[in-house]
Image (tube, helix red, strand yellow):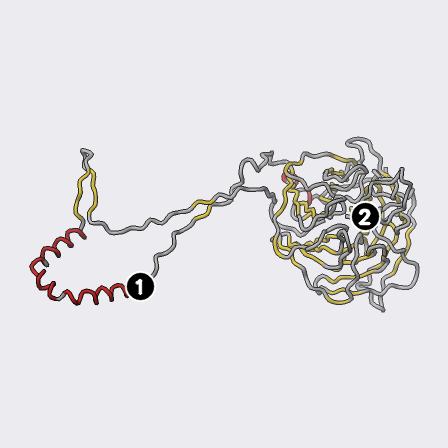
Amino acid sequence: MDGLKASSSSNRLPNVPEGRQASMHSSGPYSSSSAANSTSTLNTLGIAGSSSSSKRTASGKATTKPSNDSLSASTVSASSSSTVKRSTSTSSAAPAAASHSKQRNAHAPAPPPPLKQTLPKIPHDKDIELVPSAHMYWSKAPSWGTPPNRILRAHTVTLVDSTAWILGGCDDKDSAKDIYCLDTDTMEWTRPDTVGDIPPPFRAHTATLFDRKLLVFGGGLRSKYFDTVYLFDIPLRRWTKPHIAPGPKPQPRRAHTAVFYKGKVWVFGGGTGLTALSDLWTLDVSGGAGTKEKPMKWEKIEPRGKNPGPRGYHTANLVGSIMVVIGGSDGKDTFTEVWCLDLDKLIWTALTQSSGPVFPKRLAHSATQIGSFLFVMGGHNVQEYTSELILFNLVSLQYEHRIVNGKPPSPRGHHSAFVADSRLFVIGGANGGQGFYDDVYILDLAAGAYLPQVTNFIMNVHI
């Protein structure tokens, strides 16, 4: 386990390569399914004059009535019969007249091409799963533009307005420093140009949003581990390296977590490559961009209560004033526990199971808050990667299973997830032998579309 303490071969986890939130708010529920293309052609009929027209009598017999063109032609023929000899005498002028007629016809406009009409793409009944409209539904979303040309694994995704900002990550060979954006309204990929003090490639880092800036801490490149802090100004597309006040600071790490609360970035856990970590640090960013006059400052925090223990590849979500930590691994064991840290009272609390499904073992998963639930998706469960979706109820503090239809993402970990306009987006990841590029999956919340609006609930962890 990269960044975590090594263990004996008997207790070592399967080799878990580093591995996808996804999200700008877009309107309306979204569901995508494969469809069979059906087209039809509307033929244009050529209409030409005829010498006669047909009419059916009451007896059913067809009678032929000369057309006006036929009558005119007969009259002209009759009137000109007396002048045949005279026309014959002047027949030498006919070839010249015919030649001029052909020239005029050569310059005549070409007839218009046949009209074509296409029908809407109607999904084939064999490609669609008929499900109750209240059920949540997975689908692979179409996207376009300039998608990432590399595997997205161990990256970060931060939703700002309706745009998802994807930073860093790695493929099978190296880490990356480029930035990609996904517009969740139009599903267009772009690669913005950036300026300033651009950081080196990094993976398994954290990117924390505050004041329309992304604070990037830690991560690594190959065997290197970073303790550096970079700041990315989203409106200006500018990287800076903020000033940090002298004093103690966290050791280099990756596979940690970070949340923003009351002017501070709270960093927990991770690994150094030799050992897993359980320390908790805050970086005071209340001064803004970290100038010489108002530098940022690190502080080590010692909460009360039992510490969760060393771990990396866990998740941390800020729910009110509570930081909820799920799963992770220390390189030897994979954890099932859910820990809560009250950031006001600085007390750790381990949640216990009283009902519902057994707390699953998870690492390299994603956990996305949608209303009063955490949607825990994917990750590694000791035996294999999974695409399972399970909900953690922040009121009952227990897991719940829900019926989910559609075609879910393939099993993966080290992906990212986020919610935008009642849709859960899942981007990238890896499953050990295969990496995923710009594939985007969307979970339509259906009857649960109201959940993002649920903000007034009590999470009582001090029981």
Tally of marks: 2
Residue extending farthest bottom? 293
The part of the image, by quadrant, that contains residue 214 is bottom right
* Side of 447 where 459 appears, left or right: right
Q: Is residue 363 visible?
A: yes
The residue at 63%/50% (across/down) is 26
Picture coordinates of residue 328 (x, y %)? 83, 43
Q: Which label belongs to residue 460?
A: none
Q: Which mark is residue 321?
A: 2
Query: Identity of the amino acid at label 1?
Result: Ala
Q: Residues within 10 Å of mark 2 (few under 14, many from 20)?
A: some
Q: Quadrant of residue 377?
A: top right
Say which mark, if any, is on residue 106. Answer: 1
Which SS class for mark 1?
helix
Q: Whole-percent x and y of residue 367? A: 76, 44
- Of discs 2 and 1, which sits in the foreground? 1
Going from the N terminus, do you reach mark 2 or mark 1 first? 1
Q: Nearer the viewer, residue 195 or 224?
A: 224
Determine the residue positioned at 75% across, 52% down.
Answer: 171
Q: Looking at this rendering, what residue extends furthest in the top direction?
A: 355
Q: CA distance from mark 2 to mark 1?
A: 83 Å
- Against 356, residue 103 (above or below) is below
Disc 2 residue type? Ser
Q: Residue furthest left?
A: 82
54, 260: nearer the viewer: 54
Residue 347 % position (x, y): 89, 45
Find residue 88 and report its horizontal and vertical position in percent: 11, 63
* Left/right of residue 407 with respect to residue 89 in the rendered view: right
Which residue is depicted at the point 13% across and 66% down?
Answer: 90
Task: Say if 258 sits above or below 449 in the image.
Answer: below
SS class of the residue under badge 2? Answer: loop
Residue 264 visible in rendering: no
